Amino acid sequence: MKLRHFLRVWDFSKDEAQNVIERALELKSLQTLPKTLDGKILGLLFEKPSTRTRVSFESAMLRLGGQSIYLPSRELQLSRGEPVKDTARVLSSYLDAVVLRTYSHDTVEEFARYSTIPVINGLTDKHHPCQALSDVMTVIESGIDLGKAKIAWIGDGNNVCQSWLEASALFEFEFVIACPEGYEPDAELVKEAKEKYHAKVIITHDPEEAVRDADAVNTDVWVSMGQEKEAEDRKKVFGKYQVNQELLKLAKPTAVVLHCLPAHRGEEITEEVLEGSQSVVWRQAENKMWLHMALLEFLLVKS
Ligand code: CP
Ligand code: NVA
């Protein structure tokens, strides 16, 4: 089987991403799950905290007959200076796949260069590809015709936004990002998305323009993990980039509201919207588990 990694959305073709999503939806519909990952062991090497990504991957493994080992980086020799490349080669001989959650995206890339098992990016400062794929699954499941959809992003041009941007290029939906000046997604990434994929990406500083007639409204925290020192400044700059009921009224009445969670009520989203009838955030969180099952099958059994 050919060794494949999933470090960013663009590591997959449109067909591959679509197949993984379709398989995730199929698995979700089954009464009894197949033991397709019987005997497989997944490592979860995490530098940052996680509720959803960690538990959904662990649960995905267990439900499909596999097992997992949680490896907080502070408990590994990595924290005492053992090189990433040495860790990658050693763990490759014990495990069948590994999920990494790190600060620097370079760490995940370096790990993958030395790894002989599939490496999955479970979030870095640049990308959160598993999140974007399971979110796209949630949008499709909501009955939205992705190819014709306008999807709004309100807030920071961060890791989740950048993975969504890559997803928009693959799935050909319009992706309108409303962010404060200086908090846009990476300019090189935007350029590549437009030139190579003809992506329909629009960047504005006006949340109303982004949300008007949108099929889905998506947001994320103003302060990501690792940016704690910037928290006060960010809260001032991001003030008007809040998904509240007034803003949501501009979207289509059928629009769904997405948030990868954890949410900060009263900052990027109001309690009313998060708990409101258009919010699909709990199903979105659940879908991470189904998507991770399909992704693990793709990397460990099918490719
Ligand atoms: N959405 C997400 O990745 O959540 P966790 O940080 O809890 O894994
Ligand atoms: N942008 C957030 C996502 C958390 C799942 C962060 O990186 O902290």
Image (cartoon, rainbow, N blue to C red):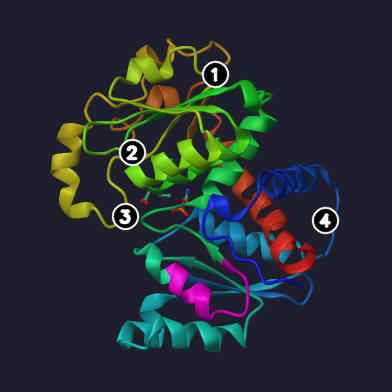
> Looking at the rendering, in which quadrant would you find the N terminus?
bottom right
Q: Does the stretch in magenta take in 111?
A: yes
Q: Is residue 246 above or below residue 117?
A: above
Q: Position of residue 14 (x, y in %)?
A: 66, 44
| Residue appearing at x 69%, y 62% in the figure | 296
Badge 2 density bin: few <14, some 14–19, many ≥20, Cα 10 Å: some
Q: Residue at x 24, y 31 (%)?
A: 180
The three-letter amino acid code for the residue at tag 4 is: Leu
Looking at the image, is 47 positioned above or below residue 217?
below
Kind of residue indicated by mark 3: Met
Whole-Å distance between the Cαs marked 1 and 4? 32 Å
**Helix, strand or loop at mark 2:** loop
- Residue underneath mark 3: 225
Give the magenta-colored segment's residue range. 108-119
Amino acid identity at mark 2: His
CB contact under 8 Å: marks 4 and 2 = no
* First of labels 4, 2 by sequence position: 4
Where is residue 242 shown, x and y percent of the image?
31, 26
120 within the magenta span: no
Which residue is under mark 2? 264
Mark 2 or 3, nearer chain start? 3
Return the mark for residue 255: 1
Disc 1 residue type?
Ala
Q: Is residue 7 left or right of residue 77?
A: right
Instruction: Report whether residue 47 is seen.
Output: no
